[in-house]
Amino acid sequence: MRGLDWPGLIRAGLVGLKLKPAEFWALTPAELLMMLGLEGADAPMARNRLEELSRAYPDAEKGRADG
């Protein structure tokens, strides 16, 4: 797995799931994602992919009608 939001996962594990730190760190990332109901979920889009899509599909010029 890559691109994990560790601060968010730690917060979700310790605050949301009320895990003790040792319990949190004993989990694999896959186990934690499963406990959070996120298993099999796609990772959020990273900035570089958004920028790539923005270049490929730029917004219409200002004042220009859609269509």
Image (cartoon, helix red, strand yellow):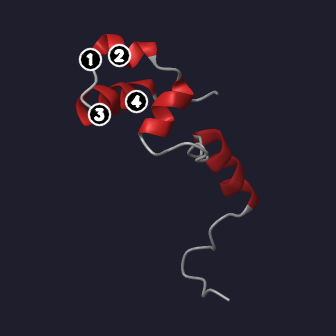
Image vertical order of residue 25 relative to residue 48, above or below: above
Image vertical order of residue 14 relative to residue 63, above or below: above
Front-most of residues 66 and 6: 6
User: Residue 39, located in which quarter of the rendered image?
Assistant: top right
Instruction: State how far apart marks 3 and 1 are (Cα).
Output: 9 Å
Mark 2 and mark 4 in contact? Answer it, CB < 8 Å: no
Residue 36 pos. (x, y %): 41, 40
Q: Tag 2: Cα neighbours inside 10 Å, few (<14), some, or many (≥20)?
A: few
Mark 1 and mark 2 in contact? Answer it, CB < 8 Å: yes
Of callouts 2 and 4, which one flags the residue occurring earlier in the amino acid sequence? 4
Name the side, left or right, on which 58 lies relative to 12: right
- Identify residue type, mark 1: Lys
Q: Tag 3: Cα neighbours inside 10 Å, few (<14), some, or many (≥20)?
A: some
Q: What's the residue at 59%, 46% (across, down)?
A: 45
Indicate which disc residue 53 carries: none
Indicate which disc residue 9 carries: 4
Which residue matches tag 1?
A: 20
Residue 38 pos. (x, y %): 50, 44
- Identify residue type, mark 2: Glu
Which residue matches tag 3?
A: 17
Which residue matches tag 2?
A: 23
